[in-house]
Image (spheres, coloured by chain):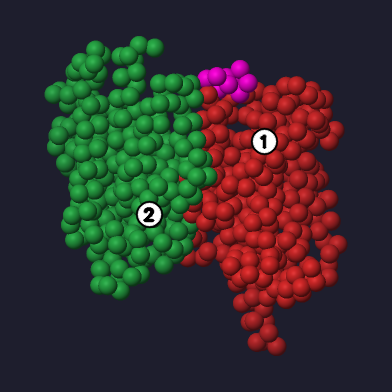
Chain colours: A red, B green
Amino acid sequence: MNGTKVASARLGPPLQQRASVLEWTRGRDWVWPVVAVAGAFLPRVVTSPYLLGLLTSAVLLAIAAVGLGFLKKQCGLGMFGVAAFIGAPAYLLGIAAARFDLGTAVLLAFLGSTVFALLVGVFVVRARPLPFAMLTLALAQMLKSVVTLQGLRPITGGDDGMSMIFDGSVFGLNQSDLSNVVSFWPMAWLALCLVLIIAHFVDRSRLGHVLRAIQSNEERMRFSGFDTYLPRIAAFTIASSIISISGILIALNTAFASPELLDFSTGGNSLVAMIVGGPGSLFGPVAGALLYQFAQDAFGATGHLTLFMGVALIVVVAACPRGIAGLVADAASRVQRFARKRD
Amino acid sequence: MSLSFGVAQILNALALASLITILASGLALIFGLRGAMNFAHGALYMLGAYLGYSAGRSLGFWPALVFVPIVMALAGAALEISVLRPFQGRTPVDMALITLGVGWIMEPAVYYWWGTAPLSVDPPPSLAGSVPILGTMYPAYRLFLTGVGFGTCIALALWLKNTTSGMHTRAVSHQAHISRMMGVNTDRLSMLVACLGTAFAGFAGVLAGPYLSVDPGMGSTILITCLIVVVVGGLGSIGGAIVASVVYGFIQVIGAVFFPSAAVLAPYLLLIAVLIWRPQGFGRGRVT
């Protein structure tokens, strides 16, 4: 036990990478609670319901992208079938909400999709990155086939999707509050904050160090007496739970679950947001989600969104694999070096 | 359940399996050479189908069946030069993302030229009727599709087994480094294989026109099925992909006959079963 502690402590510093955006806040920890609380009051400032709706969509997308970025950073795995963990909790919520009050239904949907993620994780984390990507894609497609099965039509609504009627309230919001973007915003925003906090602390925990060490050399970690399988299942489950928070919030907001939620394109959005934003940093996926949502707003009407997504994906993967976060970090360090030279 | 219904189901499943075999072997070929899972394959297949629609209207079905694969082979050469060759050192996931982006660029281009409404293609007059098989009338075109599909795979298998270039392709798929050390020109081979793979996608697209309809969603649906087939067959193993498509077809047959409502789940159950029983897939794939 003592030996493993020493090993992880030794592995710690060189593997710990901090985005330079976070440098400024070192010693200024009060900034984060202030930002989190202030953000919840955003509807006071942004009065346009359209813009607020756009920001809400961006926040929901960002939650999924943070989960994806977490998995990419900690395990080096890119999940192509994100839609599975957005659609499954949405459907679970709908099924549970028809039988229980809303609070219980949300809890059941979250626990249900976490258990589901755990079961899937047992199978898929052993796979290498490419098969992993394809397996999760197949999983999403399989779930889509399941919910559109004729036999399950009374439960899932088949191709028409599933409308939900919520009984009671969750965090003090009832059905009409949830569908109203102004009263829904604080919940989405605080969920994003919570998810970022979880990703940040797991990243800095012993689990995070072990995960990144496994990623850089699994065999050596095994020789050093570490279990390399369970930590990856844990990471997969954490990432999937984060993504399912996004799915639950989408279902709460729209009171609707449709097979499109399980479509590849739904997951493709957050995948692109994560990659364009940069998985290496905490805020990269959030920036990517914002950019994606505003690009969708700009190009969505012309139908050229897919085209621009394709171009953005190729450019980022080919030219700057660290994404926007990487570009910002490079620019910041260049400015710092320039300033130092002037002194 | 009547016998004729069962026969029709079996023939339907075989027709679908033959289409998937053509596509999956193209995917497996390119993966074997470059280690790149070509996520643009679905879009290439769709482009082939739309080209087949236009060529079929102006030239007729048979010239289209020859012309479109040639055009698609040129597209394959472009893909090889612009994507597969410059990024050959990248990780497989990077390659998957880049080809996914290529597919996303191709899709709107196709919609721009042909619109998003589903188009229907008539089978050529000589194959338009039905033929009696075991007491049931079955569309002649689907029989033709099945025959051509599996015929193509047999031709591919013969090429891989009996020619020098086929041997080199198998060698590179199995041990890329060693083959290069032994003097195989992987770039030239990869060009050939990329052209062949995309020509296959175009060929499948033209063949699919009269069988399925030509619509915007056709590429992404079949791509996922093909990916499953390639994983089940063993990544990079071309023979494995062919075997897996046939197994997939038969599982689809059994599913369609005995559990018609759940037949859509058959490929996923196959995938899960294979992963538990033999994680590396059917074939002897790339050794890495």
Q: Which residue is mark 1?
A: A89
Rendered residue at 29%/35% (across/down): B18
Task: Report how many numbered discs are placed on residues in the image.
Answer: 2
**Quadrant in which the N terminus of chain B appears:** top left
Rendered residue at 65%/23% (across/down): A163
Q: Quadrant of residue A213?
A: bottom right
Rendered residue at 25%/31% (across/down): B146
Q: Quadrant of residue A203?
A: bottom right
Whether residue A298 appears in this view of the structure is: no
Q: Is residue A296 above or below residue A170?
A: below
Residue A50 pos. (x, y %): 66, 38
Q: What stretch of residues is rendered in magenta?
A: A150-160
CA–CA distance in space, label 1 to label 2 = 38 Å
**Quadrant in which the C terminus of chain B appears:** bottom left
Question: Tag 1's secondary structure?
Answer: helix
Q: Amino acid at mark 2?
A: Arg
Q: Quadrant of residue B82?
A: bottom left
